Amino acid sequence: MDSFDETKFRELVLYISDKSAEDPRFGAVKLNKILYYSDFEAYRRLGSSISGATYRKLSEGPAPLEMLPQRQVLLDSGDVSMEHRPYFAGVQQRVVPQRKANTAIFAPAELAIVDETIEALWHMTAREVSDFSHRELGWLAAAHGEAIPYDTAWLSPEPVPQEVEEYAFTVAENHGGA
């Protein structure tokens, strides 16, 4: 497991919040899902997560264990403020950056993954992105409050095509498996 990098995590929160400023559906729940999908996609593609955050299974989907204390650090330093907006029947909690993120600490491939994630989830409401995250096998396998292992990034809810399954059995048989 990657070790948690609090600086990268905070800069990631600033970056995502700035890039999502024009998204009327962006709030705390969506921020958590963008962080989750960005970190897990980076783990899948690059071999390590961006921030090393620990994501727990919560009722609204995966959320970083470190979010509240790190958000408080950002608030205390004046790097962000919180905006509470009426949103449908509830209140949307938005992180509002007060400065630009230091993107120099990220690899270009990391920022590309974050940008792709923001774009992919842009049209979704907090409820939709939360429901979407409930299909993740790592979230499904974890108990409430339990950490979701990064290795679950390799799991897919899609069935394995028959030809791939047959090929895997052939390979296993030829190598003394199955």
Image (tube, rainbow, N blue to C red):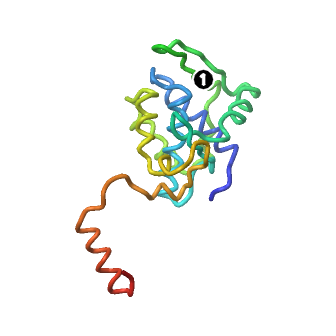
The residue located at (53%, 30%) in the rendering is 29
Query: Where does residue 111 sit, x and y in percent of width and height?
Result: 51, 45
The residue located at (55%, 55%) in the rendering is 150
Q: Residue furthest left?
A: 163
- Residue 33's place in the image compared with 50, above or below, is above
Q: Which residue is mark 1?
A: 96
Residue 79 lies left or right of residue 31; in this view the side is right
Give residue 98's quadrant in the image.
top right
Give residue 92's quadrant in the image.
top right
- Residue 79's place in the image compared with 48, above or below, is above
The residue located at (54%, 41%) in the rendering is 62
Query: Where does residue 104 sit, x and y in percent of width and height?
Result: 61, 45
Residue 149 lies left or right of residue 172; in this view the side is right
SS at circle 1: strand
Total labels: the figure holds 1
- Residue 64's place in the image compared with 147, above or below, is above
